[in-house]
Amino acid sequence: MMENAENTSEKKSLNFIEVIVENDLKEGINDKKIQTRFPPEPNGYLHIGHAKAICIDFGLAKKYGGICNLRFDDTNPVKEDVEYVDSIMEDIKWLGFDWENVFYASDYFTQLWDFAVKLIKEGKAYIDEQSAEEIAKQKGTPTQAGVNSPYRDRPIEENLDLFEKMRIGELEEGSAVLRAKIDMASSNMHFRDPIIYRIVKHPHHRTGTTWQAYPMYDFAHGQSDYFEGVTHSICTLEFVPHRPLYDWFIDQLATDSYRPHQYEFNRLNLTYTVMSKRKLLQLVKENLVSGWDDPRMPTICGYRRRGYTPESIRNFIDKIGYTKVDGLIDVALLEYSVREDLNKKATRVSAVIDPIKLIITNYQEDKTESLTAQNNPEDENAGSHEVMFSRELFIERDDFMEDAPKKYFRLTPGQEVRLKNAYIVKCTGCKKNDDGEVVEVYAEYDPLTKSGMSESSRKVKGTIHWVSCNDAIDMTVRLYDRLFNVEDTLEDKDRDFREMMNPDSLKTLKNCKIEPFVKTAKPLDSFQFQRIGYFNVDPDSSESELIFNRTVSLKDSWAKEKNK
């Protein structure tokens, strides 16, 4: 199931989660309280799939007058880092959201430990000293019941003693785990005595070496929701089988009528993209990209550096909506969303990325004149800026062809075009070097066709952009494209995802030209290069080198290639 920009309309009705929330409010569940949380694990940078979760978690709280907390699921000290904590906070704020409180699963380590001790004392948990392989074998299959661990009926005092030894580091990693005692014959494999604590001898980024045993996600997540007062715990569809276990733990813990409830929505899968944190980390560590914020990465910081706006990402999420069915979303819809947003906001400038010189032979050599260019025709309040016109201009090499086909409406000998915001010119010829390459194009201008003059109403079929050679600024342009050339990267699971990478995902062009209006532009400022696409200033820019990243082309060129 794939959606694209052409056949997807705005979702104006309530999504199924909003329907649930409104029904809960109507029935007075949890005293009509609405509280959500966004619970990332700080083991990597957020990607566009997380943006979907962020929008629903924070959006629900805002829409229904509740609160949304940010909670870091820091129960695996081996993979976690403060760097990721900081980046997650930055990304959430950039997307336009803010949290009520910041919590960590590690805030609840003592409460979680006490709850585990309570389960042991009630005969609902035990220490298992089998290897991970032995435990896995005894779990059985979906059609065959599991086998009880030989340690399942271990005395309570012995379990408590061993559990404490796990905590203080007297036992080695892998030598023991704490398992909940539920039902080894359950049809739900997650109920077959799940592991709830394991030994990890690695310093924690917040608690240091205080703890040597850490709770598993399934154990820590629901209880943390309960400790915080979460009412609607929203996650993706792969957690549907985990929900009964979530509820079981809450039933053992709860002492009143309040209950958090888990609801699942479809995760975001994009064409020509990988979302696996493991694979994204491989791309970074193997230097297949320049870092987490490489503009080809599906990370939020990558999209930000590429020139995507928070509004474009939120609008994209709104377009695809929330359902209970996984599907594959065409990345063209995301690209459409940023075009739609930047079209309304981006200042138009003239830039030439493959320059060739155009000489207007009947224009006075030492003359220059100031012309007016609209900053954004879509915004009447955007104003305008001056552009300088002169005898020698830079134009795109593709805008001249010596032997042109019939429907070529740009510069070719004997044909007229309009120079954007300037005059109509007629091509009179060209000059070539010894290799036969065109190095200069010649034309004559009609002085009565200046844009804005009454005589300028004379129509020609083509309009091209230009930059005056007198004041053009040099720049480097990075043409980013899709990182993978395989539409569905999940389809062939046995294939190395690195073999699916697009070798043309980045092209760097030097000695490009742009008008001086951008001299004062700051990193991440966005512009529309007329007739080319949307670009933004890369943070790598310096006084000696101005660097622009292509955010997106003006039109979807991939669709044309695919349909050839």
Image (spheres, rainbow, N blue to C red):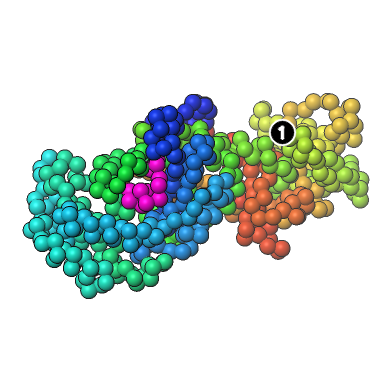
Q: Residue at x 59, y 44 (%)?
A: 309
Image quadrant where residue 21 sits: top left
Along the viewing direction, whichever of 21 and 468 lies nearer the viewer? 21
Q: Is label 1 in a helix, a strand or a loop?
A: loop
Disc 1 crowd rating (10 Å Cα; few below 14, some 14-19, many 20+) is few
Residue 220 in sight: yes
Q: Can you tell which quarter of the image residue 381 is in?
A: top right
From the image, tell me which residue sits under label 1: 378
Quadrant holding the N terminus? top left
**Residue located at (81% from left, 53% from top):** 471
* Image: 164 above or below 250: below
Residue shown at 68%/42% (left/top)? 346
Query: Residue 456 location in percent, x, y?
Result: 86, 29
Left or right of residue 155: residue 549: right
Rendered location of residue 119, percent (x, y): 21, 55
Does 165 sit left or right of 286 as displayed? left
- Which segment is the magenta one? 222-235
- Along the line of sight, the residue nearer the viewer: 99 or 282: 99
Residue drawn at 52 percent across, 38 percent down: 65
